[in-house]
Image (cartoon, grey):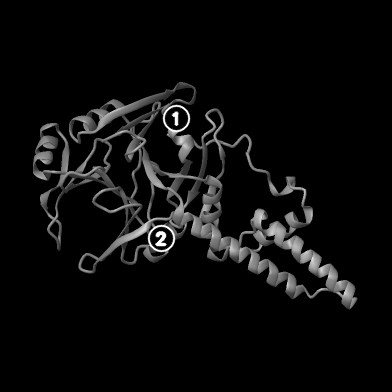
């Protein structure tokens, strides 16, 4: 699991450590007066040369005119600089090599859950990591290696045998070639089936719903061979339009499709980094008139790979997200991460792509 701990140090300098005190104060001033989507970020790497050029022109003007420079000129210059920086950062997000790495959640009996996932759902136990000094164990399961597949990271905290899943978390999706046979196997192993196999309402895809021993719901979708059987994470949101825009702009995901079901009063949106039948997707669900949910303490977060956690954090701030862990290396393993909350409070951790692969060497 990507453990979020206080950062001991940062590999990038803070504003106060830079030797451009005037520019630092200028940037900090800009940062302190912004909020939500109108957040304007002054990137020192691009702003400093422009400000130096502006300073030379200002000096020349003052010498020739013998007066003071209008404040509006300074404001216009700053606005143009920060607007250009915003555009650059958000354009970079679209080009970033991102992939959903794993989903993290807590279980009360690790051995029982591993047995259910391997015997009933056909997953493989990929690795297990015990951290006795912090009293928890991580276990990774999935349908292929972590460096190329989306996997599950289970967390067992010593002595905690039950968690509250809440009403905000929806389900995980697993693609199988024969839903009915899978359901029969699950029943034979004592699993709980909450929706028998059958066509989805208003469609032709055969689905079924089951629950694991901790009460997490899994949707089984009948689908041909796919490189990514663990294919969906469904979360409920209070404002679908807002959520879609955030996941597109800050996370760089593509909106694959939406589906409105007025009869049952809900709308879903599928977003991801690849086609729905070949990669994992986020299924965001909006229930008519419901803006808030109880999240509980069972579901934790999703991890996404990125080429630059620092630029990722900039983009998240620009789009109104909340950074809960400043970008930088984790103590002990030096893997660079940043963590954030989306507008609905769902947590995501972004992990440096190169550092992530080093964990398997």
Q: Residue at x 32, y 39 (%)?
A: 149
* x 15%, y 47%: residue: 224
In the rendered image, residue 26, in percent from the top left (x then y), is placed at 73, 60
The x and y percentages for residue 197 are 11, 48
Q: Looking at the image, is 137 positioned above or below residue 338?
A: above
Q: Secondary structure at mark 1?
A: loop
Mark 1 / mark 2, whichever is N-terminal: 2
User: Horizontal placement of 293 versus 315: left or right?
Assistant: left
Mark 1 or mark 2, whichever is nearer to me: 1
Q: Which residue is mark 1?
A: 359
Relative height, residue 37 to residue 232 (above, below): below
- Determine whether, in the image, residue 176 is placed left or right of residue 20: left
Q: Residue at label 2?
A: 243
How far apart in space, not on screen, are marks 1 and 2 (Cα)?
32 Å
Whether residue 272 is situated above or below residue 145 in the rendered picture: below
- On the rendered image, what quadrant is the N terminus found in? top left
Asked if residue 52 lies left or right of residue 105, the reply is right
Image coordinates for residue 222, horizontal then vertical, percent: 15, 48
The answer to whether residue 11 of the structure is visible from this angle is yes
Q: Outermost residue, bottom direction?
A: 65
Residue at the image position 73 percent from the left and 54 percent from the top: 24
């Amino acid at each position: 699991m990507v453990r979020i701990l206080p950062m001991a140090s940062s590999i990038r300098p803070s504003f106060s450590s830079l030797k451009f005190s005037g520019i630092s104060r200028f940037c900090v001033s800009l940062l302190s007066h912004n909020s939500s989507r109108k957040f304007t970020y002054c990137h020192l790497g691009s702003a400093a040369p422009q400000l130096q050029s502006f300073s030379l022109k200002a000096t020349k003007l003052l010498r020739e005119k013998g007066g003071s420079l209008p404040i509006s000129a300074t404001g216009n210059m700053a606005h143009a600089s920060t607007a250009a920086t915003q555009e650059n950062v958000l354009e970079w997000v679209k080009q970033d090599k991102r992939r959903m790495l794993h989903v993290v959640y807590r279980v009360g009996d690790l051995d029982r859950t591993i047995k259910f996932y391997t015997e009933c759902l056909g997953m493989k136990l990929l690795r297990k990591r015990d951290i006795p000094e912090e009293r928890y164990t991580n276990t990774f399961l999935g349908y292929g290696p972590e460096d190329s597949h989306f996997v599950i990271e289970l967390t067992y905290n010593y002595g905690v045998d039950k968690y509250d899943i809440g009403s905000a978390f929806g389900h995980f999706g697993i693609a199988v070639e024969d839903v009915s046979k899978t359901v029969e196997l699950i029943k034979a192993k004592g699993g709980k089936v909450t929706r028998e196999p059958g066509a989805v309402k208003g469609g032709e895809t055969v689905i079924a719903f089951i629950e694991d021993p901790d009460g997490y719901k899994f949707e089984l979708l009948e689908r041909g061979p796919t490189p990514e059987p663990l294919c969906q994470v469904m979360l409920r949101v209070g404002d679908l339009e807002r959520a879609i825009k955030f996941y597109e702009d800050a996370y760089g995901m593509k909106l694959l499709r939406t589906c409105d079901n007025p009869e049952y009063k809900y709308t879903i949106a599928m977003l991801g980094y690849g086609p729905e039948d070949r990669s994992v997707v986020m299924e965001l669900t909006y229930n008519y008139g419901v803006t808030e949910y109880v999240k509980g303490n069972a579901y934790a977060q999703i991890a996404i790979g990125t080429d630059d956690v620092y630029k990722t954090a900039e983009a998240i701030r620009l789009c109104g997200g909340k950074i809960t862990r400043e970008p930088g290396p984790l103590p002990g393993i030096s893997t660079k991460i940043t963590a954030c909350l989306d507008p609905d409070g769902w947590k995501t951790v972004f992990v440096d792509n190169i550092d992530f692969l080093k964990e398997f060497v």
